[in-house]
Amino acid sequence: MIKLNRKFVCPRGQEGTMKIKVFDRIVMALVISTMSLVGASMPTNAQQQPQEEQKEQKRAQQEQKQDQRQQQKQEQRLSEQRQKQLINQQQQRVAQYRQHLEQEERLAREHAALLQRQKRKAQYRYQEEYLEHLRQQQIRLRNERFDYDHDPYFYTAPKYRYNRGGRYYETNEYGAKMLRQALNHGYEQGFRAGKADRDDRWRSNYKDSYAYKDANYGYSGYYVDRSDYNHYFREGFRRGYEDGYNSRHRYGRNVNGNYSMLDNILSQILNFQNIR
C-alpha cells in the first residue's frame, strides 16, 4: 500500500502577509477586550459619584442642624444676672425649708399622740412611716453640698406656663418635673392614708391627715417654691385618699406596690402650656 505524504507549502511571497494578518487579529482582540473592561467599569464610577454627593449633602445637613441646636441653646440660656437671682432665691428657700422641718417635729408628735388616744392603729403606723421619711429628708438636706454653678436649672429658660389660684407662673423642665413628682407623691401618700382610715373603720376625712397638712413628702427645697409643691401634693393626696379609702384606682395606678397618678389626670391638673 502506497502512503502519500503531503506537505503544505506556502507560496513564496505570501508567508509574511499571513503573519501580519495574524498579528492584526491579536491586536484587535486586545483592543476589544480593553474597551469591554472600560465599559464595564464606567457605570460603577458613575454610581459612586452620586453616592459621594449624597453623603456630602447628608453631612452638611447634619452640621447645619447641630449649628441650629447650638444657637437655640444659646438663645434659651438665661443671663448671668438672672442666674444669680435664681441662685439667691434658691439658697433662701432651702434655709427656710430647713427651719420648717425643725418646727414640724413638735406638731407631728402632737398629732401622733392624738391618734393613739383615738386608737387608730393603722393611721398611727402610717404617720410614723411618713415622719421617718421626713427625718431622712432633713438629714439629706443638712448634709447636701449643692453645686449651683453647674446645675442646669439655673441657666435654663422657662419652657412651661401654668395657672394656680388664678395666677400664672413659669418654669423650665426641671421645675415641671418637680411638680409632677409632687402630684405622684401626694397620690401615693393619700392612698396609704385613706387605706389606713378604712382599716381603722374611721370616717373619711383626708384633711384630718397630718400628711395632708404637712404636704412636704418628697420635697427637696429645690427648683420650685414650697407653696407650689404643697399645693400639687395636696391635689394628688386628695385623689389618692379617695381611691385608698374606697379600694379603687379611679385616679391612679398601683404597679408592684408603687402608686402614681394616671397620666391624663396628672396632665389635666397641671395643664402646662408651652411658651417656646
Image (cartoon, rainbow, N blue to C red):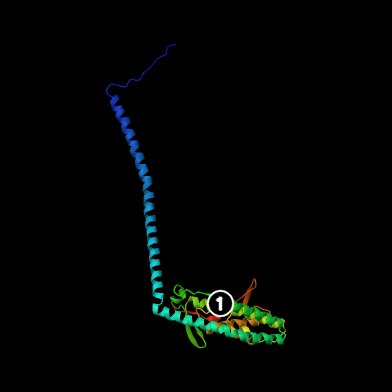
Q: Residue furthest bottom?
A: 166
Q: Position of residue 210 (x, y in %)?
A: 63, 85
Looking at the image, is 263 positioned above or below residue 43?
Answer: below
Instruction: Residue at 64%, 74% (x, y): give it.
Output: 254
Whether residue 34 can be seen here: yes
Q: Name the element at disc 1.
A: helix
Q: Position of residue 174 (x, y in %)?
A: 49, 76
Circle 1 residue: 181
Q: Position of residue 215 (x, y in %)?
A: 58, 83
Looking at the image, is 166 positioned above or below residue 50?
Answer: below
Whether residue 244 can be seen here: no
Q: Residue 205 is drawn in which quadrant?
A: bottom right
Give the left or right position of residue 71, taking residue 178 as reference. left
Q: Nearer the viewer, residue 198 or 141?
A: 141
Q: Nearer the viewer, residue 253 or 173?
A: 173
Looking at the image, is 50 positioned above or below residue 71?
Answer: above
Q: Residue furthest left?
A: 13
Looking at the image, is 71 positioned above or below residue 20?
Answer: below
Instruction: Residue at 45%, 76% (x, y): give it.
Output: 154
Q: Residues within 10 Å of mark 1 (few under 14, many from 20)?
A: many
Disc 1 marks which amino acid? Gln
